[in-house]
Amino acid sequence: MDLSTFRTAPCPHCDRPVLTARDLVDEDLRDRCVHCDHLFDPEEISWAAPDEVLAMGYFIEGFDSQPSSERGCKGGTCGVRQPAN
Ligand SMILES: [Zn+2]
């Protein structure tokens, strides 16, 4: 397994490709959307290289292929929910 790839899947709720997080469901390791907890089927999971993950709007700690001004949550592309004012 290449540690420089990330598990991703198309989330029907977030309406875009998202990173997934492993979760134990009924004794099985399954993947959930990191944003809305949607449970993916194993065949929905694909592996993305750091470049692809950055293109999806995520920031990867220690992987810096863009000028610093282009990083962060500008436009909410990283999917982090900001507190409502
Ligand atoms: Zn989602």
Image (tube, grey):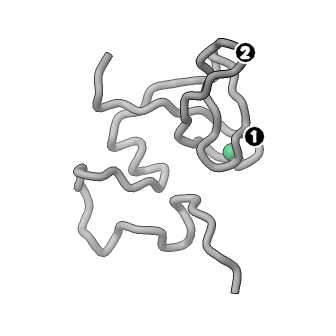
Q: CA distance from mark 1 to mark 2?
A: 22 Å
Which of label 1 and label 2 is nearer to you? 2
Q: Say which of 58 and 84 sits in front.
A: 84
Residue labelled 1 has its Cβ within 8 Å of some atom of ligand 1 = yes
Q: Amino acid at mark 1?
A: Pro
Residue at horizontal 70 percent and vertical 49 percent from the top: 14
On the image, the x and y values in percent for residue 82 come to: 61, 72
Instruction: Give the mark nearest the N terminus, 1 or 2.
Output: 1
Q: Which residue is rendered at x = 66% and y = 12% of the image?
A: 27
- In the figure, is residue 17 to the left or right of 58? right
- Determine the image quadrant of residue 38: top right
Q: Residues within 10 Å of mark 1 (few under 14, many from 20)?
A: few
28 to 67, vertically: above or below: above
Instruction: Provide residue 5's location: percent of width, then percent of height.
Output: 35, 30
Quickly name the residue at label 2: 26
Question: Disc 1 designates what residue?
Answer: 12
Quarter of the picture containing the N terminus is top left
Q: Which mark is residue 78?
A: none
Q: Amino acid at mark 2?
A: Asp
**Secondary-structure class at tag 1:** loop
Q: How many marks?
A: 2
* Residue ID at (34%, 69%): 70
> Is residue 65 left or right of 34 when viewed as pictured?
left
44, 37: nearer the viewer: 37
Query: Is 67 situated above or below 9?
Result: below
